[in-house]
Amino acid sequence: MAEPGARQRTGVELGVGIGWRAELDLSIERMPGVDFLEVVAENIRPADLPESLRVLRTRGLPVVPHGVSLGVGGAEPPSPARLAHLAACAEALDSPLVSEHLAFVRGGGIEAGHLLPVPRTRESLQVITENVRRAQDALPVPLALENVAAIFGWPDDELTEAQFLAELVERTGVGLLIDVANLYTNQFNLGLSATDALDALPLEHLAYVHVAGGYEHHGIWHDTHTTSAPEPVLDLLTELCARATPPGVLLEWDDEYPSDAALGNELARIRTAMSAAGESG
């Protein structure tokens, strides 16, 4: 087998992008300043891509399939059918990489219905390492894994999330999709320092970054992707950019869709936060 670090480099220059949703297709088609797209893989059929994605691909915009149900964080190996679907999406879209979540989503045939944090133990790390290697072997392009938002932590955790991801990267060469909104969520809900996480993560393996909004309800931060990104999330983007140059930064918006102008303003805010890193340095 090829050296994982060599075959899994994901540092493709992407720019600033937005998550493609059917509800935003026309907005994205007419919006200036979009450099790349991400599409939820479970929402498309590779043999019959949405016309909007085909149009945007003809314009040269890279499209990254983003999986939400592979479940590399479970005890069972990833489903060959789910892996085949991700691979087919990548091939149909001529994608530079595929992304998924480092999450627990099912066990014993029961769906969790949510992207849950994995137990960060040495035993879990070994299982997830094997799951990631299986996924890498089944995909035609590099894989990047995303950190998840959490409202709880497992009591027997032996590693921080950043340490766990760093060891997983060292073992597999997998790329990182760092969601700064999720780092903020975990800081808000669990008291886990987001800047400490940025200091500990191997950002040289960064594939791209997510930015999104949410809201606080009864003392809990909910990462809903339905509002403008709060300033603390953009501040974390600036902190990340002070440590590394991300190949891409992508805005997620999943419901309660705003106007074209509001979306364009969000992309401008992202670019401002990125450039602020250089100004402060």
Image (spheres, helix red, strand yellow):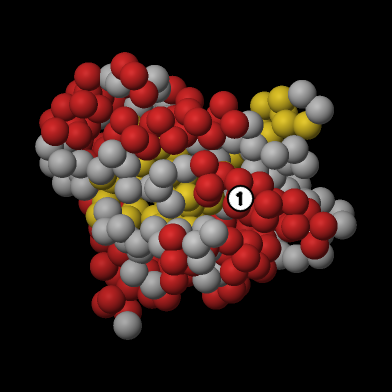
Most distant residue in the bottom direction: 281
Residue at disc 1, secondary structure: helix
In the rendered structure, the answer to whether residue 156 lies left or right of residue 70 reads: right
Instruction: Find disc 1 in the rendering and name its residue.
Output: 132
Residue 124 at x, y = what percent? 78, 54
Nearer to me, 145 or 182: 145
In the rendered structure, the answer to whether residue 150 lies left or right of residue 20 reads: right
Residue 47 at x, y = what percent? 34, 19
| Quadrant location, the N terminus | bottom right
Residue 182 at x, y = what percent? 55, 50
Nearer to me, 272 or 77: 77
Would you say residue 192 is visible in this rendering? no
Disc 1 residue type (three-letter): Val
Q: Is residue 235 above or below residue 93?
A: below
Q: Is residue 30 above or below residue 153?
A: above
In the rendered structure, the answer to whether residue 190 lies left or right of residue 275 reads: right
Q: Please tell me which residue is depicted at 39% across the width and 58% down the height of the picture.
A: 10
Residue 171 at x, y = what percent? 62, 65
Most distant residue in the front direction: 1
Nearer to me, 263 or 126: 126
Q: Please tell me which residue is depicted at 28% across the width and 19% down the height of the picture.
A: 50
Q: Please tell me which residue is depicted at 71% across the width and 25% down the height of the picture.
A: 111
Would you say residue 59 is visible in this rendering? yes
Q: Residues within 10 Å of mark 1 (few under 14, many from 20)?
A: many
Quadrant in the rendering for residue 280? bottom left
Q: Please tell me which residue is depicted at 59% across the width and 35% down the height of the picture.
A: 70
| Quadrant location, the C terminus | bottom left
Nearer to me, 182 or 57: 57
